[in-house]
Amino acid sequence: MLKFQPFIIIILSLILTACQASNIPTSNNKPQKTSFKMINDPLVSARSIEQVIRGKKVNRQYLVRFPNSNKPAHYPVVFFFHGSGGEGADLYKLEAIRLIDRGEFIGVFPSGYKRRWNSVEDNADDVDFFKKMLLDLAKDSRVNLDKVYGIGFSNGGGMVNRLAKQTALLEGIAPIVSQQLTQLGNITPQRPVSVFQLNGQRDNVIPLRGGLVFGRNHFMSAWGSAYNWANHFSCQLSPEKGTQLWGRYRVRITSFKHCVENKAVKHIVVQDAGHNIRQLRSLDLYDRIWTFFKNN
């Protein structure tokens, strides 16, 4: 793919300038402060970006972890979006750090406003927050904005789905124990992305069949969500199907291939698994996702 990092920076700057002009606070309140969960790692940078939410200035927070290396490099970036009730530090785990220190990518761990992501238009403009984080990261020459990816768990999975439909800034996404909302399914993506979608067979929070969740969000079925991505990207719609053993779990894998720009859509259903994220991390999940991203 052609390198278009300077172009991305210019476009982000123009978009954010317009957003800031239309989001002038109604009062001179100081930014609301929230505290970071302590991370005992000198290589972690705790950062914040000011955003206006309902007329009030709020400091939106995120953690950044660069590889432990002094060698000149141009690293991809992987964003990790937590589930509802969590924060960025919750996903700062050994399996992610291991990949970062192997020099695979820079890890970014943002925190949602009031511990959730706005996967539909509501209070906080999380798409704007994402763009502002990218603009901040672009100041560092080690950051490769041509290779930006998103991994999201549950509510965070809804966020990466939204970003892939409403921006042209991602190369690939991995929504975990989540699928697209019905209204997102009707949106045509601005660019092709590779999709690694994983669901638990016995998930009773966001069921495979989809439907209304918590009385407010209507989800597509897991299969329908994966098919929607594949259809948008002109993939071969007769997918390859198979089963594998991941640790003690048997998984069903459906792979849509031959998509535009060599992208791919993979749908994984973990047998006898539910919505338990800790349970799924035992599957070497980050390694599997990163291998998928690198190959597609």
Image: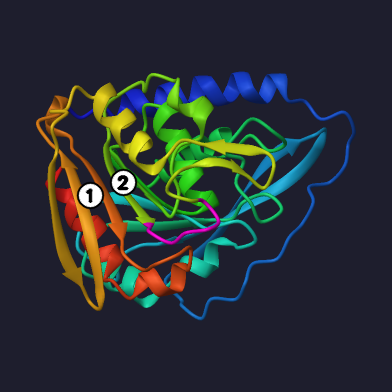
Characterize the local packing of mark 1: few (<14), some (14-19) or many (20 or more) Cα atoms within 10 angstroms. some
Instruction: Confirm whether residue 171 shows in the render.
Output: yes
Query: What residue is pinned by disc 1?
Result: 74
241 lies above or below 180: below
Helix, strand or loop at label 1? It is loop
Horizontal placement of 156 versus 99: left or right?
right
Helix, strand or loop at label 2? It is loop
Horizontal placement of 289 versus 116: left or right?
left
Instruction: Confirm whether residue 69 shows in the render.
Output: no
Q: Image point 27% across, 53% down: which residue? A: 268
Q: Which residues are magenta?
A: 200-206
Asked whether residue 256 is drawn in magenta, I would say no
Give how far across and how far down residue 138 sits, in percent: 39, 41
Name which quarter of the figure residue 17 lies in. Answer: top right
Q: Amino acid at mark 1?
A: His
Q: Amino acid at mark 2?
A: Ser
Name which quarter of the figure residue 134 lies in. Answer: top left
124 lies above or below 284: above
Give how far across and how far down residue 249 sits, in percent: 27, 72
- Give residue 243's mark: none
Give how far across and how far down residue 192 sits, in percent: 26, 27
21 or 157, nearer to the observer: 157
Name which quarter of the figure residue 71 lies in. Answer: bottom left
Q: Image point 49% across, 35% down: which residue? A: 131
Cβ atoms at labels 2 and 1 below 8 Å apart: yes
Query: What residue is pinned by disc 2?
Result: 141
Asked whether residue 201 is drawn in magenta, I would say yes
Q: Image point 31% across, 64% down: which residue? A: 271
Q: Which one is in front in this view, the residue at disc 2 or the one at disc 1?
A: 1
